[in-house]
Image (spheres, rainbow, N blue to C red):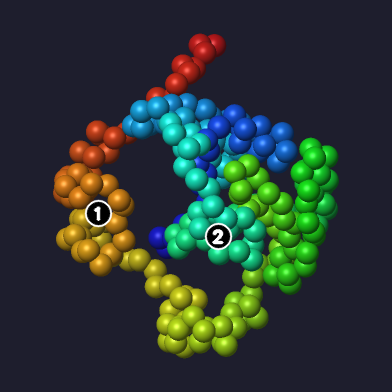
Amino acid sequence: MAQPTGIHHLAFMAGDIKKHIAFFSDVMGCPLVALFDMHGVPGALHAFLRLNDHSYFSIVQMPGVGDIPSEIGRTHAGRGENPSAAGTLQHVAFNVDDDAQLLAIRDRIRSRGINVIGPIEHGMCKSIYFAGPDNMALEVATSAAAIDPEQWIDPAVLAKAGISDSEAAGFKAPAPYSGPSPVPQPPYDAAKPHMPYPDAVYRKMIALPDEVLTKRSSFAEPPVKAKLS
């Protein structure tokens, strides 16, 4: 079935990438595994910190980012009950495997001088809450079992969200994809989501054959050559 199996990486913007690396390495215990000039973006730096062998936390630094105003309630929520602009990341929750690990990481974070609220029991998970650099709203959570949709999809809230019973059934059991491959780019449709490149540039990009765009845009070699044994 064609569906995502997890998060490969989450990327946050930083005015000072070292500050973020220090926080997520020392405070959160995530090892730095990559730091390089961001591919195809002059002046940008890109860092990856390991969560596990398949998931990473990423930081991007670009010139002038520190001069862009950060505003709680608009660019950042700042905490779980606050709003922010549509399309922004309201908060991010990292996973640990059990209650003991949740308390252990709470204590690690507190030992670095960071205040932590929790744990708080939510039924579907248990969570702790704290702040990261640049107004990040952060959480660490653990679930004792997989979330049961029969218990946690509230019919009253489906109605609030404007979701009908038939739509809900489809959302709970998405149809598998069994169509052809490769699928060509569909015609440009302004009603669909699009990346905010300049219009002429974007239309040229989506008109290119996949193999041409892949060849032009790929950066396969690591910045440090492997040592010969």
Residue located 21% across and 64% down the image: 189
Question: Label 1's element?
Answer: loop
Examine the rendering and report whether any part of residue 108 can be seen.
Answer: no
In the rendering, which numbered label is found on residue 73?
2
Residue located 73% across and 60% down the image: 127
Q: Position of residue 21 (x, y in %)?
A: 61, 33
Q: Position of residue 145 (x, y in %)?
A: 70, 66
Relative to the observer, which residue lies in front, 71 or 161? 71
Relative to the observer, which residue lies in front, 146 or 186? 186
Q: Quadrant of the N terminus?
A: bottom left
Residue located 46% across and 30% down the image: 45
- Dot 1 or dot 2, earlier in sequence: 2
The three-letter code of the residue at mark 2 reads Gly
In the rendering, which numbered label is found on residue 205?
none
Q: Residues within 10 Å of mark 1 (few under 14, many from 20)?
A: few
Mark 1 vs mark 2, CA separation in Å: 42 Å
Q: Residues within 10 Å of mark 2 (few under 14, many from 20)?
A: some
Where is mark 1, residue-wise? 182
Question: Residue 176's quadrant in the figure?
Answer: bottom left
Question: Label 2's element?
Answer: loop
